[in-house]
Amino acid sequence: MSYLSRRSLLQLVGGVAALPLASGLTGGVLAATPGTLTIAYNVNLPSFDPTVGLSAVNPTIQSIYQAVFDPYIGQAPDLSFKPGLLTKWGWNEDRSKITMDVRKGATWHDGSPVTPEDVVWSLTRAADPKGGNPIQFVWAKVGNYKIDGNTITGDVLEFEPTLFKWMAFLTGYILPKAYFEKVGAEGFEKAPIGSGPYRVDAFERNAFLRLKAHPGYWDGKPAFETVVFKFITDPTSRVAEMESGGSDLTFEIPYEEFDRLKAKPGLAGQTKPVSDIAMIFITDIDPMLDRNVRLAAHHAIDKKAIVDRLLKGYGVPISTLEAPGYAAFDPSIKVAYDPQFAKSLLAKSGYSPDKPVKFTIQTTRGFKPKDYEMIQAIVGMWRKVGIDANIEIYEIAKHFELRARHALAPAAFYNWGNAIGDPSTSTGFAMFGPSPHCAWKGKDLVERIGPLWGEKDEAKRIAGYKAVDKYIAEEGEVIPLFQYVQPIIHKKGLKVVSQSNGMILPQLVTPA
Amino acid sequence: MRSGELIRRLVLVPPTLFGVAVIVFVLLRVVPGDPIAMMIPPGASEADIGRLRALYGLDQPILQQFATWLGQVASGDFGRSISVRQNVLELLLARLPATIELALLATMTAVVIGVVAALVGILLRGRRAEWVVDGGIGVLLAIPDFLWALILLLLFGVLIPLLPISGRIDPEIDLNLRSNFFLIESILTGHFDIAFALLHHMILPALALALPFAALVARLLKASLAESEDQDYAQIARARGYSRPNILLHEVFPNALIPTVALGGVQVTLLLGGTVLVERIFSYEGIGNMAIDAVINRDFPLIQGLVLTFAVLFIALNLLVDLMVTMLDPRLRHG
């Protein structure tokens, strides 16, 4: 160990004084390193285990997880499903058993092979009620796994039509049995290994995650040898990172900044509608028990104007909780902007602009782009037809708690993500009374959605949800607003594959 | 501070911390938003929610939760973070050094800027140029630290991109250090390349924290210098023919320092509080940045640990300031 001498102290002081100058003379320390892809990422990574705890159900973190770990089943940019570590999967005729084929030749980051035992151990661990997997209730619906070569069979304990879709999303990751049992949960957090395209090289919490390409990856070595996720949660700082050249790619920035940055030399921008929608929950309390009020509230909103004026055109107006690309999307269901019709509906219930119906609408402020401004605009549109809404601002954490207690205001703004595009994870969970996420607890929907949970005929299930969506639109039991569009800014010279589920996967970024 | 007073202050530390613990524990559970509500996935039933609640011990009555947690804390176990899923104490000990180093650098920078500004200001006393110094101090004081952070970020990160604007160290650098006091250890062990890289990243956040504090030091010190300079002993020294700079530095400055240290020292706690937003803006990996995530995720054990850590730091700083004032002021030392 060497200690500080007077000479070295002087060297240090001189060096520090020269830091900014040296940076300027060398063209800036902020230039990207060749072979390295640096992503200015919008959230921190709290935990490495993708199957347990809060992080496991945070959709925003899944891009990092999918760089390090393999999901059971892969997902294409258009939300369709493709082979991952499972090459084949399916039910038997009577839906009493499942079969899965595990890919041969895949390896963990320590070089050991991925085995069917790893898959069964991961599924069994996920199904353990004491394991802390938030989606445990899905994984627990299959058990008694048997391995025959690379084929796994399991008994269906309770039919879950979306089981295989979950295998591509939240907590649907395969972890290394032998390694995990050797190092334990704490050890895994400190030194995680997966079978994904990148292995963890260095992690400084709340600062950065450095990944190195997994040379033995079954889908081919990724284009960039090194990937750095810089955790920059502040959008202004992410914009500054791109302008300073400190990062190669970022996303989730204000649309105004997106337009400004993409016009700059050296930067390019791309957008894609993603599986995240803006909506207004309607709670089945006064005055929303009045169908005229609900429908009027929906017909009075000019969604296109909101998208064009507040979101600079980056949004796709929708009429149901199914966005284009979802399995049960039905373009024929439309709730038109018609303020006159809204007025006539309210008049039937004795309301008018002079004698408005009054209620509270809750919203976040700054949680999603222009959320508060959007609700202000909607309240303005409502006022013209005879609705006097009072805006209450809350934190997203409070929204979750109120929603779980069925204590939301008559109207509450929220954004609903559905990365697997299944109607059960949009209309199903958002509108089915017993679901803790549902604000409309009416029996009408419980009776309509209930039978669809266990429907074994897929075509019939999807058709059933389309019918439910049509009914909801006709009854005005929720107000879908628009599908979000994800803005991505990157350096020119990069080819970025946008995903409909909103993930930014470094393995899909290549030099142009 | 006499030894009796010191002992009295030390004896008061445990009940103070206990009071802080009670307040934060109760507040967290009374304020809307709990971690389980954030964690509920689509399709979870009441039973599933209950299972998760029990898993994190949140199904117990508040009093029982508090007793359990307090018992753990007394034995040095701050619990396990809900979001990070690691031991809270380990997390705090890993991150606290980053904040301490940043706060130290910011304090040192503030003291240097503040003292220089005060001395220049007092030397220019009565001249028009004094207004310029006072105006500068006023501007520094009027802009809060988080706004300085954004200004510096845009100025030196974007307009004139001289310095990095995120993180504590370049992701390309491999750190092989024993402690989490990266800067101090790298200097003491002669790893100056690492020290440069660390300082490179710390300059902007440290400056953002330092500027308002420097203005405060400058204003307090300048006022004290002016007051002391008007005292008889300074006037007599002047009459004896000593030069003004000599009197200011050797006679007036030591006396003027006492109220500045007493009042300015307390402001260091505000500087520590300022690290929360500044660390966030610069993605600096200290406990301030971690605190925001902990609050967003309603990570009760981590928030409790963080609040207690801040409380300990504040108490320690106040004690330190009192000790320093006692050392500087012979009236307190011998009174």
Image (tube, rainbow, N blue to C red):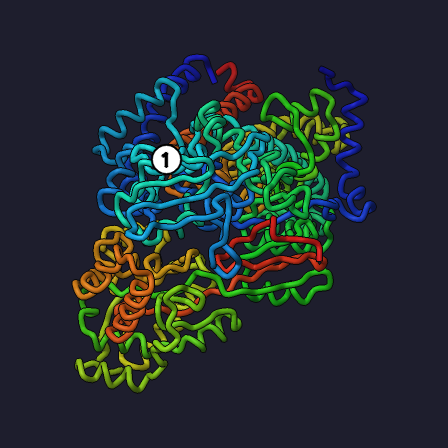
Chain letter for mark 1:
A
Please tell me which residue is depicted at 52% across the width and 29% down the height of the picture: A190
Which of A217 and A367 lies nearest the eye of the viewer? A217
Rendering coords of residue A440 (x, y %):
23, 62
Rendering coords of residue A414 (x, y %):
36, 60
Residue B196: quarter of image: top right
Amino acid under disc 1: Lys
Please tell me which residue is depicted at 41% across the width and 13% down the height of the picture: B4
Please tell me which residue is depicted at 61% across the width and 56% down the height of the picture: A239
Q: For mark 1, what is the residue?
A: A146
Q: Quadrant of the C terminus of chain A?
A: bottom right
Among all residues in the image, which is located at the extreme right? A25
| Mark 1 closeness class: few <14, some 14–19, many ≥20 residues within 10 Å | some
Rendering coords of residue B266 (x, y %):
50, 33
The relative height of residue A197 versus residue A161 in the rendered view (above or below) is above
Q: Secondary structure at mark 1?
A: strand
